[in-house]
Image (cartoon, helix red, strand yellow):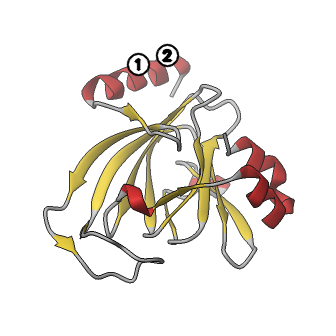
């Protein structure tokens, strides 16, 4: 897709859906579904003080701007990314056991891109467009569904101390 087509698609998708900035984390989000059913007992990592929806889904959009990235954060539920359109993103996961990995989400399977990837509960995660990218449209789904109390924003100093081999990416993915 050429740059004009990318710009046209981005305008179209932003005109169709009410994308809102994600506080603290970054990127843009449009909620598409929250289950009316809920659970009051889960095996979430940590206590829960109120019910959670069974699942939630939404569109996640990254654009080419300095502050448009998903800052390192962790959740108490697994989160699955579904790549739809645009340029690839790099997703960094910092695991509780001290290991880390990166995954590229995108359409070029031959280049090793993944169309879908699940980040496990308790992993630090953050993402950004690959260099030169203009936008990426993904969906995210969680079960149990997202709840603000289950979100923790990463601290640059603590994360670089725990994962020194990933200092450059940690700096890029923290505010």
Q: Is residue 160 above or below residue 30?
A: below
Residue 14 pos. (x, y %): 35, 26
**What is the C-alpha distance between the residues marked 2 and 1?**
6 Å
Residue in the image at 74% along x and 59% along y = 159
Going by the image, does 28 lie left or right of 125? Answer: left
The image quadrant that residue 82 belongs to is: bottom left
- Judge the density around disc 1: few (<14), some (14-19), many (≥20) Cα neighbours within 10 Å: few
> Which residue in the structure is indicated by mark 2?
4
Give the structural element (helix, strand or loop) at label 2.
Answer: helix
The image quadrant that residue 60 belongs to is: top left
Q: Nearer the viewer, residue 120 or 118?
A: 120
Residue 58 pos. (x, y %): 32, 48
Q: Nearer the viewer, residue 141 or 113?
A: 141
Residue 89 visible in the displayed image: no
Q: Which mark is residue 8?
A: 1
Residue in the image at 54% along x and 20% along y = 3
Say which quadrant the C terminus sits in: top right
Residues marked 2 and 1 touching at CB (< 8 Å)? yes
Q: Is residue 170 above or below residue 145?
A: above
């Amino acid at each position: 897709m050429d740059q004009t087509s990318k710009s046209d698609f981005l305008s179209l998708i932003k005109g169709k859906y009410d994308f809102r900035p994600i506080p603290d984390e970054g990127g843009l989000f449009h909620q598409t579904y929250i289950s009316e059913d809920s659970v009051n007992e889960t095996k979430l990592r940590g206590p829960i003080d109120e019910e959670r929806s069974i699942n939630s889904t939404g569109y996640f959009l990254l654009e080419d701007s300095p502050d448009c990235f998903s800052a390192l954060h962790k959740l108490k539920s697994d989160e699955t990314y579904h790549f739809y359109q645009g340029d690839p993103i790099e997703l960094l996961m910092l695991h509780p056991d001290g290991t880390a990995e990166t995954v590229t989400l995108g359409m070029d399977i031959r280049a090793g891109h993944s169309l879908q990837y699940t980040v496990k509960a308790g992993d630090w995660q953050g993402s950004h467009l690959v260099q030169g990218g203009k936008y990426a449209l993904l969906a995210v789904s969680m079960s149990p569904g997202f709840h603000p109390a289950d979100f923790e924003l990463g601290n640059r100093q603590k994360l670089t101390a725990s994962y020194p081999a990933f200092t450059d990416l940690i700096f890029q993915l923290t505010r």
